[in-house]
Amino acid sequence: MADRDLPTALDLPMTDPLPAPTQKYFDVCTEKLGMIPNVLRAYAFDIDKLDAFTGMYNNLMLAPSGLSKLEREMIAVVVSSINKCFYCLVAHGAAVRVLSGDPKLGEALVMNYRVADLDGRQRAMLDFTAKMTTASATIEEADRQSLRKVGFTDNDIWDIANVAGFFNMTNRVASATDMRPNDDYHAQGR
C-alpha cells in the first residue's frame, strides 16, 4: 500500500532542502492555490525533471495563446477522460469549474464532452482532441481544416495538438505511478 504522505506510489521523496528558486515557486503555489499540487511534489525528487515539467506546463497552459485558459483546461479534461486519469480529471476538472463558473460543464467534460453545452468552436476543438487521443495516426488535413473553419489559426492548431499531447503523456505517468490529486481539488468550483 502506498504511503499517502508521498504524492505517488513510488518512494521518491522531495529533495530536501529544496533549492531556493524551487522553494519560491512552491511558496507562490501555496499563496495562490492554497496548496502545492501533488504533481509538483511528485517531480520534486529531481529538480531538473521538475523544471522541465513546469517549464513545458507553464508554456502550454499559461503563456499567451489564441486558446483561452479555459479552452486549454477543457482539452486537458477531455484527454484525461478518455485516458481515465484520476489525477488530471480531478485537478483539471476543478480548473474548468472555476474558470467557467459552471460546475455542469466541468462534470460533463469529465464524463463525456459530447453531452456538454458547447459552441461550434469548442466542439470542433474537443473532437480533434479526442481523435488525437484515440487515433492520432488517422488525423488528416480534413481534421485540421475543420478547426480552421471555426476560426482556429494554424498557431492555435499547434497549441491544441501540443496541449493534447502533453496531457496524453502526463496521464500515462500519473496513472503508472498512482499519482493522487490533492483533496482540495474535489471541492473547488462547486
Image (tube, rainbow, N blue to C red):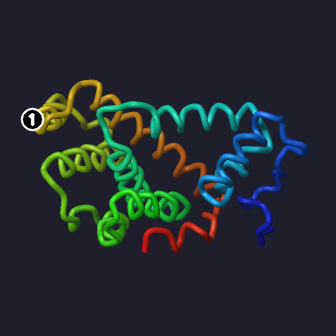
Identify the residue at image location x=84%, y=52%. 13
Give the vertical position of 186 relative to 18 (above or below): below
User: In which quarter of the view is residue 48 placed?
Assistant: top right
Identify the residue at image location x=32%, y=47%. 71
Q: Residue furthest front?
A: 31
Rendered location of residue 26, percent (x, y) = 72, 47
Identify the residue at image location x=22%, y=49%. 127
Give the vertical position of 151 relative to 88 (above or below): above
* Nearer to us in this view, 7 or 17: 17
- Please give left or right for residue 44 compared with residue 178 in the image: right
Q: Residue furthest top?
A: 154
* Nearer to us in this view, 65 or 90: 65
Rendered location of residue 190, percent (x, y) = 43, 74
Viewport quadrant of the N terminus: bottom right
Identify the residue at image location x=84%, y=41%. 18
Rendered location of residue 11, percent (x, y) = 83, 56
Q: How many numbered discs sit on the rendered protein?
A: 1
- Please give left or right for residue 59 compared with residue 17 in the image: left
> Label 1 crowding class (10 Å Cα cut-off): few <14, some 14-19, many 20+?
few
Q: Residue furthest left?
A: 149
Rendered location of residue 50, percent (x, y) = 69, 38
Three-letter amino acid code at disc 1?
Lys
The residue singled out by tag 1 in the image is: 149
- Please give left or right for residue 107 compared with residue 16 in the image: left
Element type where label 1 sits in the image: helix
